[in-house]
Image (cartoon, grey):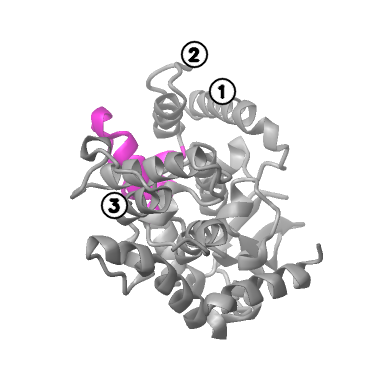
Amino acid sequence: MPEQGVQDLLVSDLQEEGKNAINLPMCPAPVEVHPEDSLLEENEERTVIDPTSRDDPRFKELVKALIDWINGVLVEERIIVKQLEEDLYDGQVLQKLLEKLADCKLNVAEVTQSEIGQKQKLQTVLEAVQELLRPHSRPLQWTVDSIHGKNLVAILHLLVALAMHFRAPIHLPEHVSVQVVVVRKREGLLHSSHVTEELTTTTEMMMGRFERDAFDTLFDHAPDKLSVVKKSLITFVNKHLNKLNLEVTELETQFADGVYLVLLMGLLEDYFVPLHNFYLTPDSFDQKVHNVSFAFELMLDGGLKKPKARPEDVVNLDLKSTLRVLYNLFTKYKHLE
């Protein structure tokens, strides 16, 4: 069915009960940058992120999310990353990160001080990464030289790819782009060019799910209808949760710990969910992810398709993910009294 037809179907379906729509990503404006002279060899190239892009809140959010993720994964190794370019370029942290994530042991020297040794380690690490990511058959956006050269754009591309592949329990901001100046020395003179580097797209695309659905269309083209969608789904869930004297007013937050999702599934399928199967008062990220994942299992048991959203995205207050989950329930159970 054409995209527009799917959108119209979703709108009309929701509005039967009273509902639909959504939100639009912002694109950064082009920026003129005047890079400082760099000490480059002939034909050597250096990439510089425009300072305005570095100061962008979404860029800072992306960098912080990745640093926090790395430090969380490597907490037992007592490794603390503070600055991605300075802490990852020699391959030591990347080696430990990949070994922990993939539960493997790489055949590399533990400590390497020389440039040759560091690049050899990086080569081994990046070959292992390429082997992991090969099923996605996407062009790699990093090299040994770019990582060792402290190219932050290349390092971010690598980390985003790893975070998506290993389904990191973090929320990466979508549609993050940076203005980049590429400086190359030719015949003794510096030449610069300006490009836009897209670091993240949508969660679905980064994880290899490229098919768009009606919610993508609505978020992109009908943000004015968001309140209608939320109001209709709130009406639907409260019709059932009210039986337990529960009331939902904020979809973004009240389903994030998974408790209401689990209880809602029990109400919709008419069974009692044993309290030992989930955390009634979750107090950690992992417990909330457990609850949402358990709710997803109940949905599969009820004959629903596997949710397109990730449990981590629901926990991280991603509205589109939460709406997708609730709309799936709405389509199956909307006529249930």
In percent of width and height, residue 242 lies at 29, 66
Residue 73 on the magenta span: yes
Measured in 3D between alpha carbons, the distance from the residue under mark 3 to the one under mark 1, in whole angstroms, is 44 Å
Q: Circles 3 and 1: CB distance less than 8 Å?
A: no
Crowding at label 2, few (<14), some or many (≥20) Cα neighbours within 10 Å? few
Q: Earlier in the sequence, mark 3 or mark 2?
A: 2
Residue at mark 3: 259
Frontmost residue, 331 versus 144 = 331
- Dot 3 surroundings within 10 Å: few (below 14), some, or many (20 or more)? many
The residue indicated by pointer 1 is 124
The residue shown at (47%, 76%) is: 232
In the image, what residue occupies the spot 41% across and 64% down? 60
Give above or below for 156 relative to 336: above
Choose between 125 and 262: the one closer to the eye: 262
- The residue at the far top in this view is 107
Which residue occupies the extreme bottom position in the image?
224
Please tell me whether mark 1 sits on a helix, a strand or a loop.
helix
The kind of residue on which mark 2 rests is Asn
Q: Which residues are magenta?
A: 65-89
Foreground: 244 or 149? Answer: 244
Does residue 230 appear to the left or right of 213 in the view shown? Answer: left
Residue 104 vertical position relative to residue 38 in the rendered view, above or below: above
Quick check: can you spot residue 334?
Answer: yes
Which residue is tagged 2? 107
- Report which quarter residue 36 is drawn in: bottom right
